[in-house]
Amino acid sequence: MQRILITGATGFVGAYLCRKLSKRQTPNVTAIYNSKPGHFSHIKYVKCDMTNLNMLTKIFDETKPDIVYHLASVTPMRIGSKGNDYVEFFNHFVTGHVAKL
């Protein structure tokens, strides 16, 4: 049975994917969220600040996913005062770390 990990699980695209997998009763799905958990059955939601690379690595080590849907990202409109450096850090560096895991 394949293990699935979804980042950005409560974002626009991630929520749709979780709903679809939940309706299919797909087993072994872990979904990472940042601010509030999702509510779909058959999915294990895990809170994680993805900029905390140690925490992110621990989740990957524990779930050992076969498939990763990396849907987490930030946009300048969502981050307010953090600025473009944070957008670049998250969207490039964090995504690169996910790819290596």
Image (cartoon, helix red, strand yellow):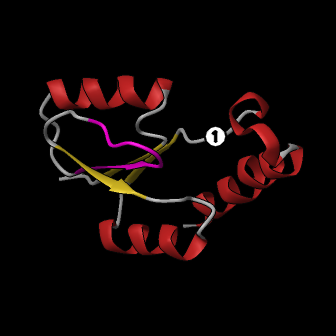
Quadrant for residue 47, please give it. bottom left
Name the foreground residue: 79 vs 25: 79
Query: Horizontally, is 69 left or right of 95 in the view?
Result: left
Quadrant for residue 40, please give it. top left
Position of the C terminus by quadrant = bottom right
Specify start and end residues of the magenta stretch as a single range.
29-38
Question: Within 10 angstroms of label 1, few (less than 14), some, or many (20 or more) residues?
Answer: some
Q: Position of residue 73 (x, y in %)?
A: 64, 40
Residue under numbered circle 1: 73
Q: Is residue 82 positioned above or below 96 on the image? A: above
Q: What's the residue at 80%, 48% (across, down)?
A: 82
Query: Horizontally, is 88 left or right of 45 in the view?
Result: right
Q: Position of residue 45 (x, y in %)?
A: 29, 50
Q: Is residue 66 positioned above or below 76 on the image? A: below
Query: Horizontally, is 29 left or right of 36 in the view?
Result: left
Query: Horizontally, is 53 left or right of 75 in the view?
Result: left
